[in-house]
Amino acid sequence: MKTYSYSILLTIFLLLSFSTHAVAQFTGGGQEEREERQAERSTANQTSLFDGEFIIKGGWANPAGMYGTLPSPNNSFTDMLSGESGFGAESGFTIGAYGMSSLGHAVNNIGGGSLRAELGLVYGLHYSQTTPNWGNISEIYTNASTPFHLVDFKIGPVLAISPVQNLVVDLFYNPMFSLGVPPEIDAQMDDFSQRFYVEEELAYGLRHGLGFNLRYSALLFSVETTFGDLNVEYTEHVSGGGSSGIFDYDTPINTSITMVTFGIIL
């Protein structure tokens, strides 16, 4: 009888041990495994979305607004330079280098899921080059002899959102201090020859940038629109028709450019 009782107790013990192991396997592991997974999640959540981000990128600079609109033969050169009419800039290229750092305000596991967000700072500079082309409008206009060189120094806030691991969407706004060298412009109007060129003064001004990045692992795709005025000093040389003269212009030029770029995160 005792042997029979011992057999029953041993059977019950084995069944309990097996069921406990099965439940642990079914639920994804025991207490130790759950703690390990929680620790891994906690470590991932504490990692900044801007951790050591340095970006080099390049692509297309596409003039927009009046800066990219062709002027009319009825417009004066003053209209073109002041932004009252089109400036006729064509697409060019842009390159840049940027850094991003956290402001220490990470929000993890939004809604209890894997969505994460973090506020940071983006800073750096980019160079863009575009050239006005008035050659297809009328015989009185000729192409600019040099491109418009523009350098933007930028710093501003950025919001990073990560819906899944390795994928980050950045939304940013950047105030920018801009320096530029406007193009030399040669033109012919009837029997008058006109030439605009920049003296030693650089164009300068405060501009703005709005855009987004898509970051996946070490790759980046970005679209950014920059806009704002640059103060430009032009000197006009006029000759022909029995008269000649030199005239100075001090005018703002609106240089709106949309940049589409690809980059590498180092």
Image (tube, rainbow, N blue to C red):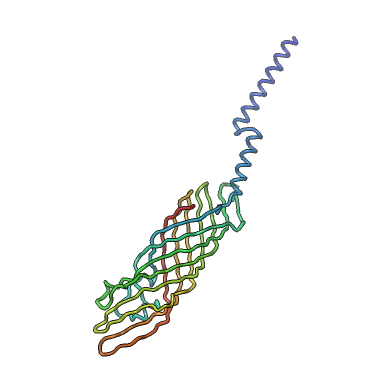
| Residue ID at (30%, 88%) | 244
| Residue ID at (50%, 68%) | 176
Q: Tell me: 27 left or right of 178.
A: right
Give x and y (percent) for residue 203: 44, 75
Looking at the image, how many numbered discs can be counted on the residues? 0
Quadrant occupied by the N terminus: top right
The correct choice, above or below, for 22 with respect to 104 in the image is: above
Give x and y (percent) for residue 88: 34, 72
Q: Residue furthest right?
A: 2
| Residue ID at (26%, 76%) | 138
Give x and y (percent) for residue 54: 51, 55
Give x and y (percent) for residue 129: 38, 66
Q: Residue furthest front?
A: 200
Q: Tell me: 82 left or right of 55.
A: left
Image quarter for residue 224? bottom left
Q: Residue furthest bottom?
A: 242
The correct choice, above or below, for 3 with respect to 43 in the image is: above
Q: Nearer the viewer, residue 31 or 248?
A: 248
Image quarter for residue 22? top right
Q: Nearer the viewer, residue 128 or 81?
A: 128
Q: Nearer the viewer, residue 10 or 32?
A: 32
| Residue ID at (63%, 35%) | 33
